[in-house]
Amino acid sequence: MIDRRTFLVGAAAALAAACSDNGVAQQSPTSSVATGAPRSTGSASTGKSSGTTAAPAATTRRAPGAPSIFVSSAAPTRNQVALTFHTDGDLRIDQRLLDGLAGRAQITCFIVGSWLEANPTWARKLLDAGHELANHTFTHPTFSSLSRAAMATEITRCRDLLVKLTGSGGRFFRPSGTDDGLARPSAQILEEAGTAGYDYVLGWDVDPVDYADPGGALVRSRVLEGVKPGSIVSMHFGHSGTADVITGILDGLDGKGLKAVTTSALLGVA
């Protein structure tokens, strides 16, 4: 009889092979990130999943079970990048950001559940504009410090709200409270996200640190100096400096021959 650990490893390997066929520069659930010397977002777990995360109904696109695959960038085979945004903040600033993106780029919005619960019409607003929704926990805690049960609750509360408002929990999960997008998450984070039905835990390889409000000019230069084909950029709603320069960022990407697309499109899993 095949034990659960053997099954999970086999299932993860099969999923990784499928991602490789789509040109995803993915990281194995059992190996470190290939670039740099990343700092882990939490201690690794050698035990079995707690089983505390309930299976989704009509949400993500694969059956729950195997650990999620960690991805921080795509293979540089196409002149595309993904701009990802954590949702929060003043809706007037958020609207200015959307106006700057309109007709020019589609983004992946990592939804903080408490923000969406307070602003439920934004789920449809973002989707109608062609953007993609993903899971960024419900209350935005320092995720790696949570117990497994608390991790499960944070993931599923946001997922279930997305399902309620849109019919889908999204394909991607990103832990909150992480400042290193290349750092492979702990085994328990990958397992809990996978149990909740998420194909991928998404990192990033470009971070302008816009949440610290360094000024729009610096946000723009950090993005454009760091970006390359296949990059995944991490930015934030609710910050005026980012909203002020989003058109300048898109102009700069145009100058580099790069197109901003959703993460699903970048990874070839749309």
Image: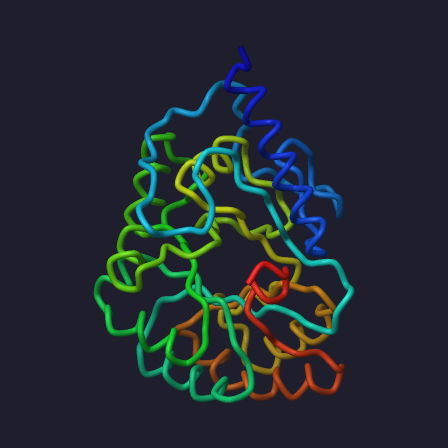
Which residue sits at x=37%, y=55%? 169
Q: Position of residue 62 (x, y in %)?
A: 47, 46
Q: Up-down: is 129 above or below 7?
A: below
Q: Up-down: is 90 above or below 77?
A: below
Check the image and name the residue furthest to the top: 1
Residue 30: quadrant of the picture: top right
Q: Is residue 63 left or right of residue 11?
A: left
Q: Position of residue 225 (x, y in %)?
A: 73, 73
Which residue sits at x=68%, y=55%? 22
Check the image and name the residue furthest to the front: 1
Q: Is residue 121 left or right of residue 5?
A: left
Q: Position of residue 78 (x, y in %)?
A: 75, 69
Which residue sits at x=58%, y=32%? 11
Check the image and name the residue furthest to the left: 118
Q: Quadrant of the C terminus?
A: bottom right
Residue placed most toward the observer, 136 or 104: 104
Q: Up-down: is 251 above or below 43?
A: below
Which residue sits at x=28%, y=47%? 157
Residue placed most toward the observer, 18 or 72: 18
